Image: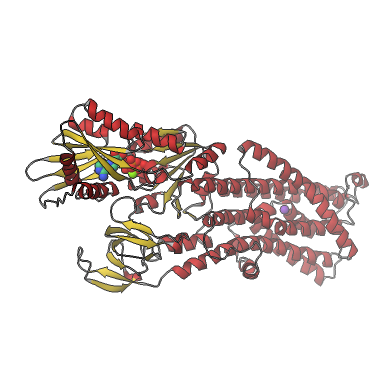
Amino acid sequence: MNKHSSPSLGLFAPEILGPAMMQAFRKLDPRSLARNPVIFSTAVVSLVATVLALREALAAGPNAVVGLQIALWLWFTVLFANFAEAVAEGRGKARADAFRATKSSARAKVLIIPGDHTAYRSRDIESVEVGELILVEAGDTIPTDGEVVEGAASVDESAITGESAAVIRESGGDRSSVTGGTRLVSDWLVVRVTAKPGETFLDRMIALVEGARRQKTPNEIALDILLAALTLVFLLVVVTLPVFASWSGTTIPVIYLVALFVTLIPTTIGGLLSAIGIAGMERLVKANVVAKSGRAVEAAGDIDVLLLDKTGTITFGNRMADAFEPAPGITDQELAEAALLASLADDTPEGKSIVDLARRRYGLSGTADPRAVFVPFSAHTRMSGVDLPEGTSIRKGASDAMAVLSGAPLSHAVDQIVKRIGASGGTPLVVARDRRVLGVIHLKDVVKPAIRERFAELRRMGIRTVMITGDNPLTAAAIAAEAGVDDFLAEATPEKKLELIRREQAEGRLVAMCGDGSNDAPALAQADVGVAMNTGTPAAKEAGNLIDLDSDPTKLIEIVLVGKQLLISRGALTTFSVANDVAKYFAILPALFVAAYPGLGVLDVMGLGSPQSAILSAVIFNALVIVALIPIALKGVAYTPASASALLGRNLLVYGLGGLIVPFLGIKAIDLVVDLLHLA
Ligand SMILES: Nc1ncnc2c1ncn2[C@@H]1O[C@H](COP(=O)(O)OP(=O)(O)OP(=O)(O)O)[C@@H](O)[C@H]1O
Ligand SMILES: [K+]
Ligand SMILES: [Mg+2]
């Protein structure tokens, strides 16, 4: 899965641990702490405890030694939480450095006269603005992101995708976007710059893996609020304790109370929450997917329906004209000629392949009449063509669209051809001159290998796959059957795609969409999870919230796994943390009150050494448990494809029960050590 040569660092590689320790101290900055209510409360309490302990020490009070230790361990709690976040970020930083190395401080060949790619001026890329045209030649590193407006070339994208085979980038069609940092292997391209300096794909990628621009997701914010509320509840609990104590004739030193407070609030999940989120992002980057928002990753964990566009996503997308099939009474030559004229200025891959076939097989050499008016293809009309100066108009397009244009249903003979091509999985393009149907162009496309098994895997995860295509129902059905999708929508315009997504969403389902074309952009934007293929158009990449660098639609499986693991890890550790806090309450209270109520000795199942050692042990346990759980937070809780409710049930049991039991064992063990070393 990870084809990058960038170091795949172990969980606790020294090159991450060292800087992370430094970083843990730097994160004591109140502005940084304030992002996390639980840890912020812990820091405030640590400060209070420090002051109290120092006062006690100066007065040579009886609680001085234990007080200082408590204060120290409270600070450790904060530092460990910071450390967890820093380790998670550190792993991304290594990746960011690898990207930074590919970032060229390059200069750009900015064209002076549009249309003339021989006259250019070399300028610093930082000064090049969106919309300017630059020339890139064989051997050059493409200096920034853009859209190819002229030329075709092979591009080595290994710096970004890790994939060593060069890919074709060309104007028109769905393969027109280029990424800064990749290198031209052959030929030349004129590229319209689409990214502002400092905001290129590579820049965003770096910021992302470093976690610099990571924003909390709505789920994280909701959890933060819950944790803050719990903190408040325990504040009340702790504040009322002295009342009970004085009532029963005991006094509990204030430093015990503040320590108790920290052990009760959800410091474990509070300390690990952001590490879990960052680690999820990192796993995604490892799968060669860039997420623009953490929210998309979480949503991916809950996806019900996956919509895929056909051409270029399920099939390879280089639909090639394979044959001209004339209507009765029309010659091959006549059809080929009309098809050629209608395609001379059509720069879609389909259009180019038609020109190519007409020239190759029929030796036609037509050149475009400069006065001809070209009608470009649109996904909306699903046709294209040309209006010639002498008044002839030629159109080619999807069969249903062409039937509407010619004002009558297709003749039986033509309909048969269309059906035959469709049933074979090919795309039939009907050609008409002055609304008279001349015949059909057979476009062939190939289903990507191994896609069937991957869709079966999605089905096992409970995800329904739906193929949407602008093609006719017969072609769609043939490809759908071959690829093994659950359902399909044919003759879809961009509006219909959008409508389908809205309908699924209105029925309460979470929708993911994979696409690469500009006509997919609205749908990618509307979907809860929009995965744009990296080979796609800039519009598609802008609209999606995830970008797959390998342009592999089945990558969604990995994305879903990462999302599920993120949700499950967070759920499991939250359960553990809260169960832990409840358990601590019952573990420590008897020790604090046993002097006043000897009857409580029964409850004091743990037989902790003394109130001092009980409280100190609890504080130490509370700090150490954060460190102990860092590996789970970073690696994620193990996930196997199973229904969500089964997983939830299992995890609640394991982590809930574990959370209740572990503190008793842990605190007791630490208490023994504390006793042994006479620390309290
Ligand atoms: N260059 C073209 N000229 C005329 N008609 C075309 C051209 N390219 C495609 N078509 C027709 O328009 C239809 C819709 O194309 P569109 O790109 O919207 O969808 P698609 O590529 O078939 O499917 P997908 O939504 O998977 O990309 C095609 O099925 C084909 O019949
Ligand atoms: K706690
Ligand atoms: Mg398409």
Q: Measured from the top left, where is residue 35 in percent x and y?
A: 58, 57
Residue 547 seen: yes
Identify the residue at horizontal 65%, vertical 54% (top origin): 633
Q: Is residue 212 left or right of residue 642?
A: left
Taking 248 as reference, is 288 above or below it?
Answer: below
Quarter residue 198 falls in: bottom left
- The residue lying at 22 percent from left, 39 percent from top is 396
Seen as rendered, the residue at the extreme left is 390
Residue 194 screen position, x and y as percent: 33, 59
* Quadrant position of the C terminus in the picture: bottom right
**In this figure, which colouring scheme has been used for the structure?**
secondary structure
Image coordinates of residue 145 in percent, x first then y, are 36, 61
Q: Nearer the viewer, residue 661 or 457?
A: 457
- Between 639 and 66, the one lying in front of the other is 639
Q: Quadrant of residue 193?
A: bottom left
* Residue 499 location (% of width, % of height): 37, 35
| Residue 8 to residue 464: above or below | below
Residue nearest the observer in this picture, 613 or 152: 152
Compared across the picture, whether 170 is left or right of 91 comes to left
Quarter holding the N terminus is bottom right
| Residue 213 shown left or right of residue 361 in the figure | right
Along the viewing direction, whichever of 78 and 480 lies nearer the viewer: 480
Q: Residue at x 42, y 49 (%)?
A: 532
Question: Which of the 4 image quadrants contains residue 321?
Answer: top left
Q: Residue furthest right?
A: 598
Q: Is residue 156 left or right of residue 38?
A: left
Q: Quadrant of ligand 1?
A: top left
